[in-house]
Image (cartoon, helix red, strand yellow):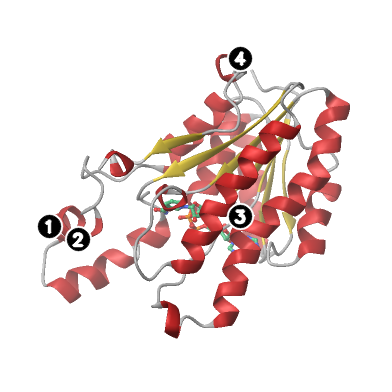
Amino acid sequence: FLTGKTAVVTGSTSGIGLGIARAMAQAGADVVLNSFTDNEEDHLLAADLGREFGVAARYIRADMSKPAEARALIEEAGACDILVNNAGIQHVAPIEEFPPEKWDAIIAINLTSAFHTTAVALPMMRRAGWGRVINIASAHGLTASPYKSAYIAAKHGLVGLTKTIALETAEEDITANAICPGYVLTPLVEAQIPDQMKTHGMDRETVVREVMLARQPSRKFATPEQIGGTAVFLCSAAAEQITGTTISVDGGWTAL
Ligand code: NAD
């Protein structure tokens, strides 16, 4: 049902972004993949995705820490009916030891880039008469944990930006929402499991259940496919009146 629409997904060569891009392509949308690397594999990934789902798919390099590049991504895409602001990084340290340059980078990539992409995409959506802005926040956009100050500030900020976009587009066929995942099993999270097993002297199953998913009552990771499915739902007719809100995909984290 998304045939003829173009979805631009920031930070989409792995993990959740790739899961969303795949779900959009499966629903018929043309997709633009993005990261800051510009390797041969990035372009191959886009070509493979296009072939698999019979849609137009391409890769555009842009570093989301740089405002001009975030804006240029949308300009170069040429069309942006569905904007998914997904690029994000993390750093864990107590506030007094938190490197200021890490704070700046996290705010720039996880929050400010979404302002810049949205500023360029909204006029395109208005011309097309339809648009969907989907911001990938986090359970940490709604609740806090110690030692993740920049990430939590950025994700709360992204939820606030989402509400503002929704109000500025409320009378148009444009919606803006934030998806708030709990722990999602991405390559990045998978890579942490062996270390955690060693640190805690536990087997895989125990460390996942007792340490990594301690705050996720379902004791199950969400998957990139599930986040992709949620993003596609937000593009469906059923979701037309859903705007300015958050959808948690967190196994009950924020119910605690
Ligand atoms: P990931 O590291 O697998 O993917 C991040 C993507 O962002 C990659 O494609 C990477 O290339 C890209 N990226 C990083 N810095 C960039 C930059 N400067 N410019 C352009 N692209 C850049 O991570 P993920 O787990 O898939 O996370 C994706 C999003 O989901 C992030 O915003 C993250 O905060 C959020 N999230 C993740 C989880 C989780 O458990 N994995 C939970 C809640 C929210």
Q: Are marks 1 and 2 in contact (CB under 8 Å)?
A: yes
Q: Quadrant of the N terminus?
A: top right
Which secondary structure lies at badge 4?
helix
Relative image position of residue 31 (x, y in whole percent): 69, 39
Q: Is residue 55 visible?
A: no
> For the residue marked with disc 3, what is the amino acid?
Gly
> Which residue is at the front of the view, 134 or 194?
134
Label annotation for residue 206 = 1
Up-down: is 57 above or below 150? above
How far separated are the C-alphas under marks 1 and 3?
31 Å
Which of marks 4 and 1 precedes in the sequence?
1
The residue where tag 2 is placed is 211
**Please, what is the three-letter code of the amino acid marked with disc 2?**
Val
At a point 75% along the width and 34% down the height, the residue shown is 168
Q: Quadrant of the C terminus?
A: top left
Residue position marked by numbered label 4 in the rendering: 237
- Mark 4: few, some, or many residues within 10 Å (few <14, many ≥20)? few
Nearest to N terminus: mark 4 or mark 3: 3
Q: Is mark 3 within 8 Å of ligand 1?
A: yes
Dot 3 or dot 2, earlier in sequence = 3
Q: In the rendered image, which quarter is residue 212 located in?
A: bottom left
Q: Is residue 247 left or right of residue 194?
A: right
Q: Which residue is drawn at the image coordinates 46% and 68% (left, top)?
A: 149
